[in-house]
Image (cartoon, rainbow, N blue to C red):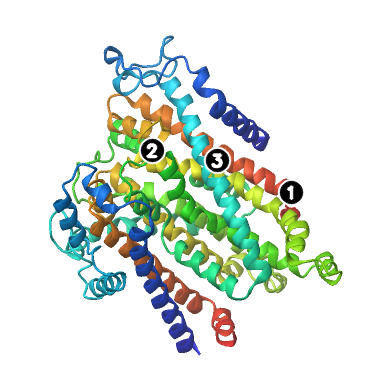
Amino acid sequence: MGATYLFRRLIRAVLTILAIITAVFALVRLVPGDPVDSILGDHAAPEEREALRARLKLDLPILEQYTTALGETFDGTLGRSFRTDRTVSSLIGEVIGATVRLGLAALALAWLLAVPLGILAARFRGQRIDRAASFVGVLGLAIPTIWLGPLLILGFGVQLRWAPLPGDGGDSLGALILPAITLGTALAASMMRQTRGALAAALGEPYALAARGRGLPERKIVRGSLRASARPVLTIAAAQIGALLSGTVVVEKIFERPGLGSLFLDAFFSRDIPVVQGCVLVIAVIYVLVNVALDVAYAVADPRVRVQAASA
Amino acid sequence: MTQRLALGFVVLFGLLAVFGPWLAPMDPTTIDLGAQFASPSAAHWLGTGDNGIDLWSAILHGARLAGLVALGVVGSSVLVGTVLGTLAGYLGGWLDDAISALADVLQAFPGIVLNVAILALVDQPGVLHVIVALSVPGWVLYARLARAEAMSLRDREFVQAAVALGATRMRVLRRHIVPNLLGPVFVQATTGVGGVILAEATLSFLGLGPSQGVSWGALLDQGSAVLLRFPHVALVSGSTIALTVLAFNLAGDGLTDRFDPRTR
């Protein structure tokens, strides 16, 4: 039963990835205007334009363009950069480690803060700690990433000098802290709210009431209800992964860090279309894969999902 | 109370977006190199920024741009999303499958990434390009909402009665389905305005915003560059963005509480 579920989910992921490749391919051809114009400007010589057209493979029949694009995706090169003539995959390979480290640090921070605080707020709902947590949650969701970053630099970098300024600190762990907080705050806030909500609902269920009636200590009831409330928390985590990935673009700019987002922006400004497309593809595929992993995690955490999926 | 305050701020933002540029004491493109990054004073209420531009005037002009982009993106997203979502939900079948598949693919791209990819393909992004780039993924949210509402309305008695009385599909959609799903859609749109203002500011912050006009996000970007010496530029523009977005979110929550019986 579990295997069928996993298999189906993987098939759907593969189909989505194919659709993403097609969409990235279609984007260049669907957006009105000629990409050649936007790269070279209006004053390019006709020969130059033809040469670029050939490099972009825009001179081939559309079907052949598509098969070339698929080929370049599956042989792992993702095409070649205009500027450096290196393969897009090697450019991405160089920087993706930094982005993954940043993302994982933000995620770890969000989990470590959000889940315990959410559990405390649900356990003592209506009390002072709950109100404090709810206030922090609203604040964390409301503050824009582009604003939180400069504020943190100003506070902890300039005034208190606790953390290195952007560009200093290199690859050290200290240089990762402020970027991770900037990136993880919104995620932490929404996960905290979701944890509190789901657990508070579970603690009002008849089984919790029954356990309470038998005199079980509240601590044990909370522990028993955690698993039942895992699913909504994971759902919100999944919904936030996209924001996390978008956030890396912003955070890497604010803190002058190398990474997928910086590569993406640089490629944008130099109109290096293959690199832009490669980054879009990699980011979208990461997003899909993370979602698959989370779906599998639901099934593990909550047996009801497996049963539903098998009977559907 | 907070929601009243938020609603007041939303109204103020609307007024400033319309009248702001006329209220501005100076042209925010006037260069005064002698007064670069000056602190707030009587001459410049919020101080000056890069090239000595008056920040208060720049904020007022930025409100116009933010309002324009928000109006364009939310307007077109609500229109396209409501039409497609309603058709998908009410008619179902292959049309529903096609629209839902398109929505799924668009949602597989994390927000900003798709916007940037679209803007990469135009030479000098203008306001219209930014609106298009934000609307391409923007309609999906409203389509999902309209689809769910249309599906649940389809089985309600008054709709069944209209169908039984021989009303055409078009009439049922126009008279019974659409008017009943517009409420939740408009409530969502209020929160949506905040999201679009933030998205425009973020794009401009990254240097991808409209090449003409003054944007709050671009001001914050300039402010971040001189954060260590002249923090007031970033503080002014950043808190303007944060407060505006917060106000729209709270106003949206307020409208949900008032008009959505399920949350009561």
Q: Residue at x 68, y 53 (%)?
A: B184
Does residue B79 appear left or right of residue B28 in this picture? Answer: right
Q: Chain of mark 2?
A: B
Q: Which residue is mark 1?
A: B259
Nearer to us: label 3 or label 1: 3
| Label 3 to label 1: alpha-carbon separation | 22 Å
Q: CA distance from mark 2 to mark 1?
A: 36 Å
Q: Which residue is denoted by mark 2 in the rendering?
A: B210
Q: Amino acid at mark 3?
A: Leu
Residue B154 left/right relative to A288: right
Give the mark nearest the N terminus, 3 or 1.
3
* Chain containing the residue with disc 1: B
List the single residue furthest toward the front.
A46
Residue B201's spot in the image, x, y percent? Answer: 42, 39
Q: For the residue marked with disc 1, what is the amino acid?
A: Phe
Position of the N terminus of chain B by quadrant: top right
Q: Looking at the image, how many numbered discs can be counted on the residues?
A: 3
The chain carrying label 3 is B
Dot 3 or dot 2: first in sequence order is 3
**Helix, strand or loop at disc 1?**
helix
Q: Amino acid at mark 2?
A: Pro
Nearer to the camera, A184 or B118: B118
Give yes or no for contact between labels 2 and 1 (Cβ–Cβ under 8 Å): no
Q: Choose the circle earlier in sequence order: 2 or 1.
A: 2
Query: Viewer-nearest of labels 2 and 1?
Result: 2
| Mark 1: few/some/many CA within 10 Å (<14, 14-19, 20+) | few
Q: Position of residue B244 (x, y in %)?
A: 53, 35
Q: Which residue is mark 3?
A: B71
Asked if labels 2 and 1 share a chain, the reply is yes
